[in-house]
Amino acid sequence: MIQRQQKSIPASGQGLASLAPAVVIALFLQLVTIPVLSSQLRAESQYVIPTAEIPLRRGQGTDYKIVALVSDGTRVEVVERGESYSLVRLDNDKEGWILTRFLSDKPPLTQVVDELTRENEALKVLQEQSEEKLVVQQQQSSQKLDELSQTLMETDQALKATQAEKSALAASFEKLRNDTANVIEIKQELTDVTAENKAIKEKLTVLARENEELKNDEKINWFLAGGGVLLLGIIIGKITSRSRKRKPSLL
């Protein structure tokens, strides 16, 4: 709530009355130049230190009108800093002069406590979220571990089956190699037997030819033998006939 402060008129009213126009003019110039200066100066944030409500005045002194009452811990922007009074701007852009000793760079303790309380609450919420996330991650990790265990077991079974198939293939290959060696041996033996059969056939051909020649020679021999017997019979017949013819002559 904005409170107004009445200016007290001293006993020497005539002297002050003569200064009234000058004060009015100075006050008017000050009110005109304050917005211009405030836009050119760099503002900085400050806090009102814990105390009673502090009046914000139009000028530097208790004689100036109160613009507003600033509560403890209110954040203001210092537009112009002075030794006794400083020009500040409120959040609603209202400006005025306040005693410099009531300004501080540090926020009030109540505000610090509130901020720490809010941070503590935020940390509690973050901790609860982290715990929930941790539980979810543990569940997911446990599920993944079960899946990996199942996959490992299936892989182990597949590996054993593969090793069994490998052993079977190795045995089949060994048997095939032995069979191939036997086939090669049988083929070689067959080749040898074929060569022997060919040689035997050639020998049989030669023997057959020789046998045929022998048969032809035997026929000739028999023919010659028959011819010789026949010739011998003729000779013996002639000799016998001659002997018969000679016997009568001897008588």
Image: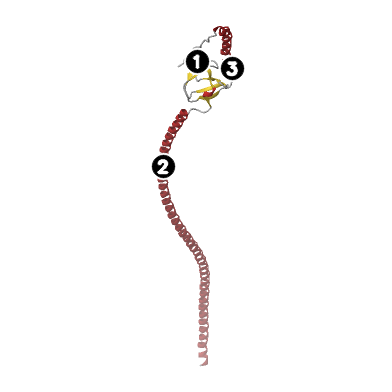
Residue closer to the observer: 63 or 231: 63
Q: Position of residue 106 (x, y in %)?
A: 52, 28
> Which of the two discs, 2 and 1, labels the residue nearer the N terminus?
1
Amino acid carrying label 1: it is Ile
Task: Tell me the quarter of the picture where residue 123 sits.
Answer: top left
Q: Position of residue 32 (x, y in %)?
A: 57, 12
At a point 49% along the width and 17% down the height, the residue shown is: 68
Residue 167 vertical placement versus 27 (above, below): below
User: Residue 37 shows which numbered tag?
Assistant: 3
At a point 51% along the width and 90% down the height, the residue shown is: 247
In terms of secondary structure, where does tag 1 sit?
A: strand
Q: Position of residue 201 (x, y in %)?
A: 51, 67
Q: Are marks 3 and 1 in contact (CB under 8 Å)?
A: no
For mark 1, what is the residue? 66
Q: Nearer the viewer, mark 3 or mark 1?
A: 1
Amino acid carrying label 2: it is Gln
At a point 52% along the width and 71% down the height, the residue shown is: 207
Q: How is the image coloured?
A: secondary structure
Q: Nearer the viewer, mark 2 or mark 1?
A: 1
In terms of secondary structure, where does tag 3 sit?
A: helix
The single residue placed furthest to the front in the displayed view is: 11
Q: Position of residue 232 (x, y in %)?
A: 52, 82
For mark 2, what is the residue? 138
